[in-house]
Amino acid sequence: MKRNDRRMKMRPKLLKRLSLDRLMDLKVDYAFKQLFGSEKNKEITVVFLNAVLQRNEHHRIKEISFANVEKSADYEEDKESRLDIVAVTDANEWINIEIQFTNKYDMVKRSLYYWSGLYQKQLTRRMSYTRLQPVIAINIMNFDLFKEMGRFHTSYRLYEDHDKTLLTDVMEFHFLEMPKLLRDWKENKLDPWNDTLARWLLLLGIVDHRKNKVYEDIYKELEEIAMEDENLRNAFQDWETLSASQEEWLAYEGRLKRVLDDESARIDMENLEKEARKARQEGEKARQEGEKEGRQEGRQLGRQEEVVESTIMFLKVKFPEYSMDAVSEKMKAIENLESLKKLQQELAQAKTWTEVEELLEM
């Protein structure tokens, strides 16, 4: 049944104190962890996990415990975007689950790296490998990772190439791409009444502080569902309570600022890579011309100019208020190509103009 055709009932509003735009964005890791990583909210976390993993009734998760719940926004960057969970299924299997929020580069490799750490960490001295438990990585992303796929939820395991037989159940990855979910919602392709995963992911999508946007239509639909879904109703109420806390809101705002800074750096890096690809193409053309004329020095110069130009473009985006003349002059004075490339990498990681000046000894 289409959402516009469903008869609306008289019901009390879920939000008693706050407007939608005053709720935390649950796609920000801090907010998600404070809601879904809370001891009192274990039941809604179990529902969310079962919706993602979609296991049969004998292997559904029944109990969980949390491994790394921090209450402050001032914790290690490697841990702040992750929620580690130990789960027990109806078949009494133990599973390690990691929910990861990220907007960074090398998403797949990053997920593999964190998975390997969680898997390896189980092994203690004289422990048999047979006692190692499965590790599942759940990645929630605010960008399209697999652009060639239309599904917002994709999952991966270790299968044999030809027969597609499962090698082992110890490795499992799930990727949840929020932009694809919201596109499906706008195109009326989702049915949160019957699709539990869509229901809970749409909850995460209601508030978007990255774009200063709220989806009132999603809220109204989920508000009605919550009249019949006690877990969803409890999630709404605890979400409002969390957002109303001044202490929690200040911690959330601090984390949101860092998330936005990271995303800005990611976009800058994407632009840098585009310009670098363009520069490489132009450099290749110059090298080919240089080869025809037998000028080895021309090819070397082309590579150096490519590095300098792409770096300048990146720094202009990141620090538009500063002149790049001195930077260009300093970089062009470096004759060794490898040294120049190393400097480029260091400059790309600089967070302030002072760091740029120190790297260039300006």
Image (cartoon, rainbow, N blue to C red):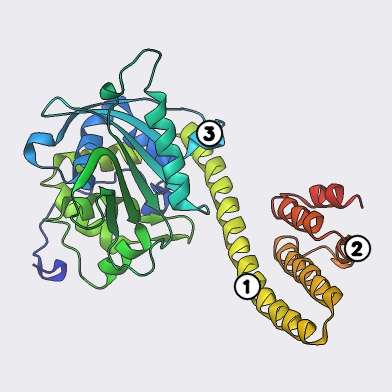
Sequence-wise first label, 2 or 1:
1
Q: Residue at x 80, y 61 (%)?
A: 337
Mark 1–mark 3 contact, CB under 8 Å? no
Q: x, y (%) of residue 175? A: 33, 52
Residue kind at label 2, given as amino acid type: Ala
Residue kind at label 3, given as amino acid type: Ala
- Nearest to the observer: residue 107 or residue 306: 306
Q: x, y (%) of residue 251? A: 52, 36
Q: Quadrant of residue 30?
A: top left
Distance from Cα at disc 1 to Cα at disc 3: 37 Å
Residue kind at label 1, given as amino acid type: Arg
Sequence-wise first label, 1 or 3:
3
Residue denoted by label 3: 73
Q: Nearer the viewer, mark 2 or mark 3?
A: 2
| Image position of 113 (left or right of 351) | left
Element assignment for label 1: helix
Residue denoted by label 2: 326
Q: Residues within 10 Å of mark 1 (few under 14, many from 20)?
A: some
Q: x, y (%) of residue 176? A: 33, 54
Residue denoted by label 1: 277
Residue at far top of view: 126
